[in-house]
Image: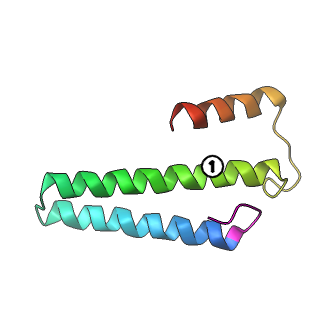
Amino acid sequence: MKETCDKKTILQHVRRVCGQVQGIEKMIDEDRDLTEILQQIAAADSALRSIGKLLLLDYAHGCFNAGKKLSKSDLEKLIIHMFKNL
């Protein structure tokens, strides 16, 4: 993933995850093998975490929130939450 202030790239990644989730829904509907479904869930989860990291990095560069800054405490909580869920 590109690492600075690229909303278009982030949205492309979000759309890809949406496609993955739709694929998971179809796999469940088709009674596909549980192992295959779980692999796709893991892939979608990983992709979402990557988007979260990218958004956090972009926030640090001042790209999001239209100039609104989080308090130091809120930013620390957000960072801890992101890393706790890696």
Can you tell which quarter of the image residue 7 is in? bottom right
Image vertical order of residue 16 relative to residue 49, above or below: below
Identify the residue position indicated by label 1 in the image: 53
Relative image position of residue 5 (x, y in whole percent) = 77, 63
| Front residue (pair 35, 77) | 35
Classify residue 46 as left or right of residue 29. right
- The amino acid at mark 1 is Lys
| Front residue (pair 69, 47) | 47
Image vertical order of residue 19 relative to residue 55, above or below: below
Relative image position of residue 57 (x, y in whole percent) = 73, 50
Relative image position of residue 83 (x, y in whole percent) = 59, 34
Can you tell which quarter of the image residue 11 is in? bottom right
Quarter of the figure that contains the N terminus: bottom right
Relative image position of residue 18 (x, y in whole percent) = 43, 66
Q: What residue do we see at 80% from left, 47% from top? A: 60
| Front residue (pair 41, 21) | 41
Classify residue 40 as left or right of residue 63. left
Q: What residue do we see at 59% from left, 32% from top? A: 81
Q: Secondary structure at mark 1?
A: helix
Q: Callout 1: few (<14), some (14-19), or many (20+) C-alpha neighbours within 10 Å?
A: some
Residue 43 inside the magenta-drawn segment: no
Residue 4 inside the magenta-drawn segment: yes
Farthest top residue in view: 73
Classify residue 34 as left or right of residue 38. left
Range of magenta residues:
1-7
User: What kind of secondary structure does the magenta stretch mostly adopt?
Assistant: loop
